[in-house]
Image (cartoon, rainbow, N blue to C red):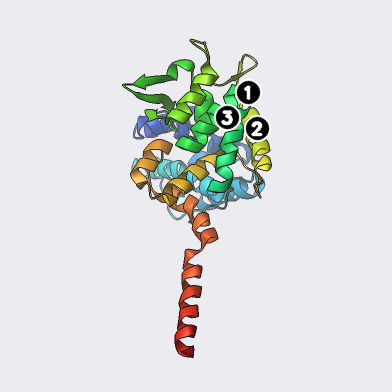
C-alpha cells in the first residue's frame, strides 16, 4: 500500500515544475502522515478528511489560513491527478473549500520616521552582521532566510554594481543589486574573509533566532508600537517603496515577489493609517460648510 501511494506521488510530481517539487513533496508527506495518524486510507479519503486536515492545521497547529490554503493546492491537485488517471473512482478534493484569506496583512512595519533611525542603529552596532542583515532586509526586501543563506562568495560586483546572489524561495537563484549603503555594510561584515557564511557571529553562521532577537531590540529602541521581526523589515521595504511611487515591477524584482498581490496586502495598512481618503472627505465637508456660510 505505502509503496503504491509513493509510486503515485512520484508520478504526480513529474507533472509539477521542478522548482515546486520539493515543496509539493513535503506537503504531501505531511498529508500522508496525518492520514496514518488518523487511520485514514489515502486512496479512500473523503472530502471531510481533507476538510478535517485543514481545520487541524489552522486550529490545532496555529497555521495561517493563507499558508493552509497554499498547502491544500498540492493535495487537491494530487487527488485530481489520481481521479483523471482512474486510480480512484471519485475525487474527494473536488469541492473542498479553501480557507478564507484576507486581502490585507496586519503584520508590523516601520514608517520612515522609525525606519531611518532603526537602520542607523543597526549600522552602528559593533556586530557587523547586524548592519549587513538589516540593510539587506530593509533596503532590498529580502526574505529573512535569504541573507542567512548567503556566503562570502555570493557578494561581488557586476561592473560598478554591487550584487548578492540570492537563493530565492523554491530554490531559484537571482542576482540582486545593492545600494552603496548596503554594499558598505555587507563589506564590513565580510572583512578580510574569503569564504564561509556572509553573516557570522563569533565564528559561526548567524541563526534566525539571533537575527530576530537583534531586530526586536532595535525596534523597541526606535519606539515601534508592535514587535518588529525580520519579516517586518521586508514589509517596510515594500510599503515605503510603494509610498515613493517606485514601479511595482522594480519592487517585485528586488524582493523576489512573483505577483503584486502581496504588495497590495502589505501596503493596505499604510494606506489605512495615512487615510488620505478621510482627510480629503473632511476637507471637502469643511469647504462646503464655508461655502454655505458665505
> For the residues marked 2 and 1, what is the alpha-carbon distance in whole angstroms?
10 Å
| Residue 4 % position (x, y) | 45, 30
Q: Earlier in the sequence, mark 2 or mark 1?
A: 1
Q: Residue at x 59, y 40 (%)?
A: 117
| Residue 11 % position (x, y) | 37, 31
| Residue 180 % position (x, y) | 43, 28
Whether the residues at callouts 2 and 1 have beta carbons within 8 Å, the answer is yes
> For the residues marked 2 and 3, what is the alpha-carbon distance in whole angstroms?
12 Å
> For the residues marked 3 and 1, what is the alpha-carbon distance in whole angstroms?
9 Å
Give the mark toward the camera: 2 or 1.
Answer: 1
Q: Dividing the picture into quarters, in which one does residue 233 lie?
A: top right
The crowding category of the residue bearing disc 1, from other C-alpha atoms within 10 Å (few below 14, some 14 to 19, many at least 20), is: some
Task: Give the SS element for disc 1.
Answer: loop
Task: Give the SS element for disc 2.
Answer: helix
The crowding category of the residue bearing disc 3, from other C-alpha atoms within 10 Å (few below 14, some 14 to 19, many at least 20), is: many
* Residue matched to label 3: 123
The answer to whether 247 appears left or right of 128 in the picture is: left
* Residue matched to label 1: 127
* Residue matched to label 2: 214
Q: Earlier in the sequence, mark 2 or mark 3?
A: 3
Q: Dividing the picture into quarters, in which one does residue 157 lie?
A: top left
Q: Relative to 151, is 227 above or below?
A: below
Amino acid at each position: 500500500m505505502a509503496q503504491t501511494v509513493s509510486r503515485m506521488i512520484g508520478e504526480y510530481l513529474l507533472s509539477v515544475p521542478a522548482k515546486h517539487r520539493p515543496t509539493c513533496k513535503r506537503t504531501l508527506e505531511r498529508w500522508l502522515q496525518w492520514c496514518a495518524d488518523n487511520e485514514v486510507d489515502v486512496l479512500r479519503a473523503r472530502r471531510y478528511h481533507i476538510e478535517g486536515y485543514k481545520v487541524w492545521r489552522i486550529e490545532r497547529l496555529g497555521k495561517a489560513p493563507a499558508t493552509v490554503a497554499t498547502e491544500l493546492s498540492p493535495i487537491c491537485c494530487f487527488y485530481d491527478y489520481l481521479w483523471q488517471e482512474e486510480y480512484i473512482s471519485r475525487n474527494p478534493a473536488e469541492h473542498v473549500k479553501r480557507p478564507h484569506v484576507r486581502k490585507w496583512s496586519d503584520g508590523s512595519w516601520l514608517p520612515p520616521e522609525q525606519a531611518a533611525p532603526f537602520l542607523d542603529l543597526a549600522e552602528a552596532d559593533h556586530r557587523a552582521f547586524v548592519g549587513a542583515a538589516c540593510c539587506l532586509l530593509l533596503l532590498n526586501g529580502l526574505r529573512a532566510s535569504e541573507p542567512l543563506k548567503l556566503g562570502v562568495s555570493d557578494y561581488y560586483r557586476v561592473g560598478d554594481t554591487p550584487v548578492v546572489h540570492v537563493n530565492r524561495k523554491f530554490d531559484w537563484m537571482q542576482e540582486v543589486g545593492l545600494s552603496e549603503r548596503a554594499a558598505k555594510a555587507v563589506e564590513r561584515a565580510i572583512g578580510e574573509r574569503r569564504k564561509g557564511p556572509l553573516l557570522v557571529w563569533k565564528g559561526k553562521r548567524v541563526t534566525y533566532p539571533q537575527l530576530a532577537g537583534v531586530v526586536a531590540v532595535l525596534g523597541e529602541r526606535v519606539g515601534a508600537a508592535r514587535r518588529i521581526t525580520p519579516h517586518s523589515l521586508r514589509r517596510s521595504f515594500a510599503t515605503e517603496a510603494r509610498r515613493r511611487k517606485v514601479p511595482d515591477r522594480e519592487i517585485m524584482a528586488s524582493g523576489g515577489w512573483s505577483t503584486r498581490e502581496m504588495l497590495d496586502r502589505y501596503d493596505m495598512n499604510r494606506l489605512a493609517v495615512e487615510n488620505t481618503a478621510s482627510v480629503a472627505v473632511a476637507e471637502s465637508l469643511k469647504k462646503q460648510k464655508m461655502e454655505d456660510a458665505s
